[in-house]
Amino acid sequence: MRPESQIRKMLSPYTLISFGVAAGILYFLVSYFKIDLPEILETIQNTHIGLFTLALSIHYTSFPIRGARWHYLAANGELHGESAQRLPSIRECSLLVYLGWFANSFGWLRIGDAYRAYAFSASSKLGFFNSLGIIIAEKILDITVILLLLSISFLGIIVLRDLVPSTAILLLAIGLTTIALTLLGIMAKFGSSISSRLPGRAYLIFSSFQQGTLNSFQGLRLAIALSVAGWLVEAIRLYIVVRSVGYSLSLVSSLFVALVSALITIFPLTPGGLGFVETGVVAVLSPWIGQNGALVITITDRSITYLSVLALGSPVFTLRYLLGQRNKSD
């Protein structure tokens, strides 16, 4: 996805429609639940700035972790050794992860991942579909680790005798993981047979995509550790956000809620899952904290994970685009 195309997507009718749908969902959320808006606004105004700043800082430590994981997955398989030297640095990968999140915040159907694949392929010379395969491998790993951590946090909530959430969330995670691993298994077993029956260009595209996906799964210990670390950072951020607005939630429960939010954004129907994430998180948090508290926490947390990415990502994306244009003209 070229930067020019990315900018056009930002202004496309599909994006505007997606924001319209998100606005409708948020309106339903506010009007359906019995929400005391004056109390919510007062609570937000009294947010502990120090804790909020700490949560914001912790959130941005997740990008180097995800960047290191992406670099490691790309360096697997055939890319080990001398050929790995052509890969973008971990710093560059971390920046691209952030810009991918930024693009997903205003684009629909995770267009930021396509942008990441294009930018990565341009830097590494691996090819777009090979790079996209690495990102798909990253997503499959994420879904699997989310299921693992959801199960652990669910058991932790039971052990702590906290309010046990609906098992439907676990069933959703199990379903997504099963689908992802099944498709991966089909690709591993029948991929060569499928690609051999495809015509010229389609064969090259599928083979490159298959190579990028499957080769990423060689030597996964570090990738799994980095994935776990990334989601634990998300849980710690939410735990501190809850404290910053005057509520209390255990770290185990914070991990569970953060992972629910992640599940919703895997296949977002709106930019950044806007509307759906808020509704889901409020629904999960309300039995613990009440509707007003759940909405306060959700608004505060999304100001970090969504609004700050939009606000800070815009100048970073623009600067990168302008520097790229200048380098082309030199």
Image: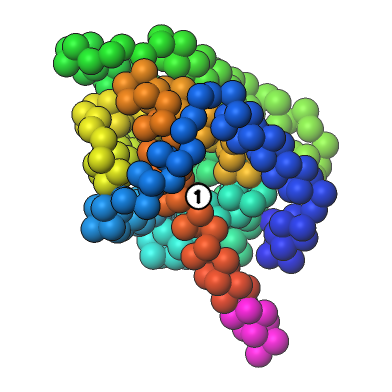
- Whole-percent x, y for residue 47 in the image: 31, 50
- Whole-percent x, y for residue 155 in the image: 25, 14
Residue 250, relative to residue 98: is it above or below?
A: above
- Does the rendering let one see residue 160? yes
Residue 199, relative to residue 128: is it above or below?
A: above
Q: Is residue 70 left or right of residue 245?
A: right
The magenta segment: 322-330
Q: Amino acid at mark 1?
A: Tyr
Predominant SS of the magenta segment: helix
Q: Image point 30% across, 43% down: which residue?
A: 245
Position of the N terminus by quadrant: bottom right
Q: Image point 42% across, 59% down: which residue?
A: 94
- Whole-percent x, y for residue 52 in the image: 30, 53
Determine crowd level at label 1: few under 14, some 14-19, many 20+ residues with C-alpha closer than 10 A: many
Q: Nearer the viewer, residue 75 or 178?
A: 178
Q: Nearer the viewer, residue 76 or 18?
A: 18
Secondary element type, mark 1? helix
Task: Report if residue 27 lies within the magenta region.
Answer: no
Q: Nearer the viewer, residue 295 or 223?
A: 295
Q: Which residue is mark 1?
A: 306
